[in-house]
Image (cartoon, grey):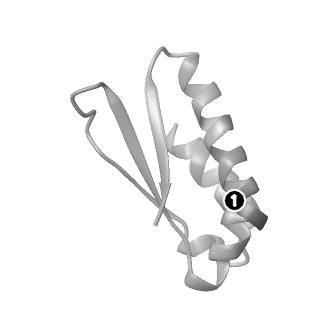
């Protein structure tokens, strides 16, 4: 899952080497939170107009997680 998020984010940004993902342990509801870090100048590319790209990233990640019966959340830091 982490590799998928990195791959998607690197395809969107100008500086792929700045893409980092931190993974939290599952919380009490069983949700694993992925924190996506990108360069400051690439933040707009990852979020998109009105958050459309960020929403699409979250949908893709949730769909991939549903194949393994896990719950995830993606936060863009």
- Residue located farthest toward the bottom when viewing the structure as drawn: 41
Q: Locate residue 52: give its quadrant.
A: bottom right
**Residue 31 image position (x, y, % from top left):** 36, 31
Residue depicted at x 67% and y 48%: 55
Q: Residues within 10 Å of mark 1 (few under 14, many from 20)?
A: few
Q: Locate residue 48: give its quadrant.
A: bottom right
Residue depicted at x 69% and y 51%: 8
- Residue 75 versus residue 51: which sits nearer the camera? 51
Vertical order, 7 against 13 (above or below): above
- Residue 54 versus residue 23: which sits nearer the camera? 54
Residue depicted at x 47% and y 14%: 69
Vertical order, 75 against 32 (above or below): below
Residue depicted at x 25% and y 39%: 25
**Residue 47 image position (x, y, % from top left):** 67, 64
Left or right for 50, reference 65: right
Q: SS class of the residue under badge 1?
A: helix
- Residue located farthest toward the front when viewing the structure as drawn: 50
- Name the residue tied to disc 1: 51
Vertical order, 36 against 28 (above or below): below
Number of numbered discs: 1
**Residue 59 image position (x, y, % from top left):** 66, 36
Left or right for 25, reference 76: left
**Residue 12 image position (x, y, % from top left):** 75, 64
């Amino acid at each position: 899952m982490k590799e998928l998020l990195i791959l998607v984010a690197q395809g969107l940004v100008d500086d792929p080497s700045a893409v980092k993902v931190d993974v939290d342990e599952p919380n009490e509801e069983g949700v694993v939170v992925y924190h996506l870090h990108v360069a400051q100048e690439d933040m707009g590319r990852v979020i998109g107009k009105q958050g459309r790209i960020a929403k699409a990233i979250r949908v893709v990640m949730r769909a991939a997680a549903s194949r393994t019966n896990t719950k995830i959340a993606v936060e863009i830091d």
